[in-house]
Amino acid sequence: MRTIKLFVLTAAILAALEGSAAAQAMFTASVGNVFGGDAPSKKSVWAVAIGGGGAHSIGSELEFSQTSNFLETADGVAHGKVLTLMPSIFVAVPIARVRPYGIFGFGFIRQRADDESLGSLFSDLSDEHVGYSVGGGVTFKFAEHAGVRADLRHFKVRKANGLSFQRILVGLVLGG
């Protein structure tokens, strides 16, 4: 229960930060791969994020991602998926059109069977499904309100033997 309270507090702080960044809102759609850690092999992933930057290049985002066929049976048959819903805070360093950034998030990382619906992301939440992400990347703005982003992050479920993997994404950024 303590973890759920911490997550709600984090979400409230992010919402408060987001209000000051309304003029710099952004939407990002990305594709890439997960690898390492508990990922048995490279797997495709997609993600969408909304967020924005505020004063001093500090911002926040809320990202949802899905990795299909994350698990493999002993005979190599892929199944299951990993869903993440991760509110994050980032710090960017604007250097003309290039913006390197560091990012930290605390949210949900759920491993699900193929036959479970997307709505099951929020059912039966517990400390077993809370984790963090940490990483960084770079955004290149090729127009005032459009750019591309490359992002590398490490994900870990908070418990000692929790799910862990790395993820690399490339995406289109609109806004910001």
Image (cartoon, rainbow, N blue to C red):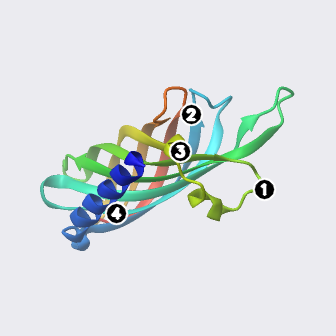
Q: Residue at x 73, y 57 (%)?
A: 116
Name which quarter of the figure residue 115 lies in.
Answer: bottom right
Pointers 1 and 3 in contact (CB under 8 A)? no
Name the residue beneath numbered marker 3. Answer: 129
Residue 151 rendering spot, x and y as whole percentages: 42, 43
Q: Residue at x 56, y 34 (%)?
A: 163
Q: Residue at x 25, y 72 (%)?
A: 22
Q: Amino acid at mark 2?
A: Leu
Label 3: which secondary element: helix
Q: Earlier in the sequence, mark 4 or mark 3?
A: 4
Name the residue beneath numbered marker 4. Answer: 51
Q: CA distance from mark 1 to mark 3?
A: 19 Å
Is 153 rendered above or below residue 41? below
Name the residue beneath numbered marker 1. Answer: 115
Quadrant assignment for the C terminus: bottom left
Few, some or many residues within 10 Å of mark 3 (<14, 14–19, 20+): many
Q: Residue furthest bottom?
A: 23
Q: CA distance from mark 2 to mark 4?
A: 26 Å
How many numbered badges does the structure rendering display? 4
Residue 111 in the figure: left or right of residue 135? right
Residue 145 in the figure: left or right of residue 69? left
Pointers 1 and 2 in contact (CB under 8 A)? no
Name the residue beneath numbered marker 2. Answer: 163
Q: Earlier in the sequence, mark 1 or mark 4?
A: 4
Q: Amino acid at mark 4?
A: Gly
